[in-house]
Amino acid sequence: MTGIVDKAGAIRLGDLAERIGAKVKGNPDVEILGVGPLREALPSHLSFLADGRYLPELMESRAAAFIVAPSFENIDRNLLVCANPYLAMALAAQRFAEPPHLPAGIDGSAHVGEGCELASDVSVGPLALVGSGCRIGRGTRIYGGAIVGSDVQIGEDCLIYPRAVIQNGCRIGSRVIIHSGAVIGSDGFGFAPDERGRHVKIPQVGMVQIDDDVEIGANSTIDRATFGKTWIQRGTKIDNLVMIGHNVVVGEDSILVAQVGISGSTRVGSHVVLAGQAGISGHLEIGDGVRIGAKSGVHTSLPAGDFSGIPAMPHKEWAKTMAVMRRLPQLREELRGLRAKVRELEDALRGE
Amino acid sequence: MTGIVDKAGAIRLGDLAERIGAKVKGNPDVEILGVGPLREALPSHLSFLADGRYLPELMESRAAAFIVAPSFENIDRNLLVCANPYLAMALAAQRFAEPPHLPAGIDGSAHVGEGCELASDVSVGPLALVGSGCRIGRGTRIYGGAIVGSDVQIGEDCLIYPRAVIQNGCRIGSRVIIHSGAVIGSDGFGFAPDERGRHVKIPQVGMVQIDDDVEIGANSTIDRATFGKTWIQRGTKIDNLVMIGHNVVVGEDSILVAQVGISGSTRVGSHVVLAGQAGISGHLEIGDGVRIGAKSGVHTSLPAGDFSGIPAMPHKEWAKTMAVMRRLPQLREELRGLRAKVRELEDALRGE
Amino acid sequence: MTGIVDKAGAIRLGDLAERIGAKVKGNPDVEILGVGPLREALPSHLSFLADGRYLPELMESRAAAFIVAPSFENIDRNLLVCANPYLAMALAAQRFAEPPHLPAGIDGSAHVGEGCELASDVSVGPLALVGSGCRIGRGTRIYGGAIVGSDVQIGEDCLIYPRAVIQNGCRIGSRVIIHSGAVIGSDGFGFAPDERGRHVKIPQVGMVQIDDDVEIGANSTIDRATFGKTWIQRGTKIDNLVMIGHNVVVGEDSILVAQVGISGSTRVGSHVVLAGQAGISGHLEIGDGVRIGAKSGVHTSLPAGDFSGIPAMPHKEWAKTMAVMRRLPQLREELRGLRAKVRELEDALRGE
């Protein structure tokens, strides 16, 4: 259970090499049953060298073989040599790790509404709810206690974890993973003040569209659009407890770390990284490849570059500014000292 | 589904005008079937002009009629003219949008405890849980998978969304909306340290009271009081992932944006705005109408005004301070330059 | 219901004194039925004096007896005198307060998988889910709608609140409290970029271990380890909406206030306090007894001390720095004034 992945059966080292795009050094016929870190790997495991400092641990590891970068290809163990060992390790682990088991078919205690089209091998776990008029593609697993509203479309091979909620009318692509407690399609936060300062609800009648290969973390929330859609595009990964407001668009292959918040109608580009607890105001444009530091607060559109701080400024500028800020009390003392000297000089000049 | 609201049937433009307090220009007999933004509206829809810049879009829109401010009342289309088009749009959309359908009555798979008094048209969805001794008013919908504890009182026309949790003894007013994943009445965070530095739990035996017309966002949490009550007053709107500590009181018509946190026993006034990710320490008083900027940290009571920053200061002061802070490296250079000059002056004077 | 705790029956004041380690002044035979604050206590209640300022309220309180510090032992009421009244109050309240009732045994609507070993008095509430192969110790309550995965171990006398989720393979100690909406064992946030900048998922095959006497707040999330375990040690208390990344270790008796985030592989010591909305980057070491101020951002390891700010610095230094920062616009003016004077001096000297 702890770091041992061996559910999918053995594979020859040579076959695994082919699968993950690596070169074998040593015995290609060794059988691999799982993956583990250097210290914990079993004799049937593949392990990996992430950093040269751990070489002594590799030499003492019981593992059957190791993924290494080309610079380590002369180590006298069975090796899978490849340019990107970190990626290779991910791919190798995927060969062995499997999502939690769930039998195909609809559990007797689940509720599935009328007019749904479920591919034959869809699984719906115990006490899960699926509303009416849904279409769910093959291989998708709705785990126990998950809730899917009405008129929802879900693609193939998705994992909808226990207690995730997808609300009415949302569209989910293929290979999407939605973790426990995530809420997709809650109402956007929209109100119009009346003459007494009371907040009149603006009905939120849009939806949320989540494209292929997106992952949504535990207890994150993505609000439905006022009109139209809130849209998370292909390959973007969202961590836990992230808040995405109504009508936000997030481009492809972006990374949103835990507890990030994005206010309504902001458009975030592709390959963007928002570090933990960062916040972005509404109605902004964040360009492709922009990176925002942890805890930063963004109040203006940012076409390109790295940014940090509240309010956010270019990251290098921020680093310099923070270095000075830490010495503010000292700067104040220097300023005081200088003022005293200037007074002395003035007196000296006047005294002449 | 995307931006189309047409569930409640057609209404004459003249009747709609009366309903939302607007004046008709053009044909009052046109039938309206829904509401949509300028570009997406269907020929049976009402649309709206939020900003004069979109006038060309209005002229090309297929919509049957438009809500506009008085300054646009000469546009040659069917118009609903009113002083506050944004509010009028909210009211018009409310005419068409309906909360997710749920049949009246208790679903066969729901659990309702003993001694509950449910008004005749209350609906309790599939796999929902209602504890014993609850009183629920007419028109309230407990959606599938929602959980209501024991001895809970809920007023009329509330929406308790899938997987919301209301715990034992809490009291909810009328027309309250609680979104998915919100937790009302979890234990406050209270411990007394013993002589070894271990944290002994202080039982949290109070409750949460939520008054009429409050909305609570997805995955927000409101802790029960140690004694007495945590209290959210009429008309306050709370966004997603907000944390409200034990014994907090929030006044009427306040706005708490996503990921805000309020620590225990703090009292927040009416018509207060707390922007996203702001945090307020415990045992403070925040006066009526106070506005706190995004990501601000409040450590002292604030009777009135606008505040920003960590720690929070008056907003205008903060804006000036941040403008200087951005130039700190430059200020340090100026200080160094000045110091050098003063040394030169000193040398010059001494040299005389 | 509001501040009244009287479920466990009456107890003599003298017996209660013994139980909580206090000395009786007055009548030890008075019967106590519950606990309440000074103003709300009933004549059968024990109350407490937390602060001398409330002495007038004590004198007017209807309560039968009062917990006070030794400096107040001459008050002419029935008293329980002890060195730490706050702790004594917590212990006394525990005598009366009971967790929400749940009958022992498995509710007919709950699902319990194959191969589980449940102690005879375990309770599993309505519509709760327990996977296969779980072991659950005596006295533990799985409330209605809670979800426990497969191969989970849970100790004795735990409270797993409605809609908490504990995922496959996690291990929970004894007397652990997990509040509604908390997710234990969601996937860690780990991806390896491929040559196109796409994020390839690193399977998260470790687990979460939670030791005895830990409390986890509502809607908090604790991710499972990539390999090995994410580990929360004995006695640590975690508030609501907290995020704990994969492979994090938190020591004993630490306090993590609401909306705190800890990134992957960071090790936090014992008796650490992380105030609300603080964030800690990944792969750091936070020493025993360290205290981090609200909203702080920690980017470096911190062996000992108190820290605040973004980025975090020693707390006293931060307080001084912030005091100067508030006067930055004034400092800039002083700098300008000084520059003007220096120019005058230069001119005066040159003019000679």
Image (tube, coloured by chain):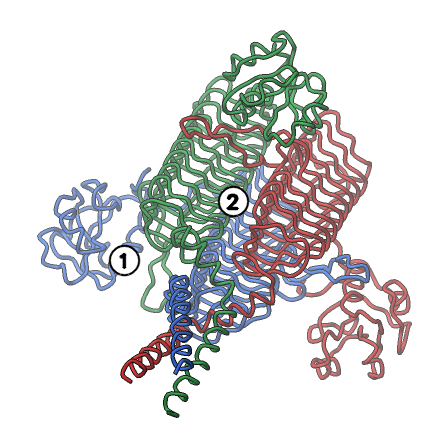
Chain colours: A blue, B red, C green
**Relative to the observer, which residue lies in front, C297 or B92?**
C297
Which residue occupies 50% across, 22% down?
A: C83
On the image, the x and y values in percent for residue B266 come to 63, 44
Which residue occupies 46% across, 59% down?
A: A256
Report whether A89 appears left or right of B220: left
> Disc 1 or disc 2, which is closer to the eye?
2
How packed mark 2 is, by other alpha carbons closer than 10 Å (few <14, some 14-19, many 20 or more), is many
Amino acid at dot 2: Ala
Query: Which quadrant would residue A308 be assigned to in this image?
Result: bottom left
Question: Tag on residue A86?
Answer: 1
Q: Secondary structure at mark 1?
A: helix
Amino acid at dot 1: Tyr
**Relative to the observer, which residue lies in front, A152 or B82?**
B82
- The answer to whether residue A211 is seen in the rendering is yes
Question: Taking B216 as reference, is A230 above or below it?
Answer: below
Position of the C terminus of chain A, as image quadrant, is: bottom left
On the image, the x and y values in percent for residue C113 come to 47, 30
Q: Secondary structure at mark 2?
A: loop
Question: Taking A23 as reference, is C185 above or below it?
Answer: above
Which residue is denoted by mark 2 in the rendering? C258
Question: Taking B269 as reference, is B53 above or below it?
Answer: below
Count of marks overlaid on the render: 2
Report whether C348 appears left or right of B246: left
Query: Which quadrant would residue A313 be assigned to in this image?
Result: bottom left
On the image, the x and y values in percent for residue A176 come to 47, 56
**Relative to the observer, which residue lies in front, B322 or A91?**
B322
Q: Chain of mark 1?
A: A
Which residue occupies 77% across, 66% down?
A: B89
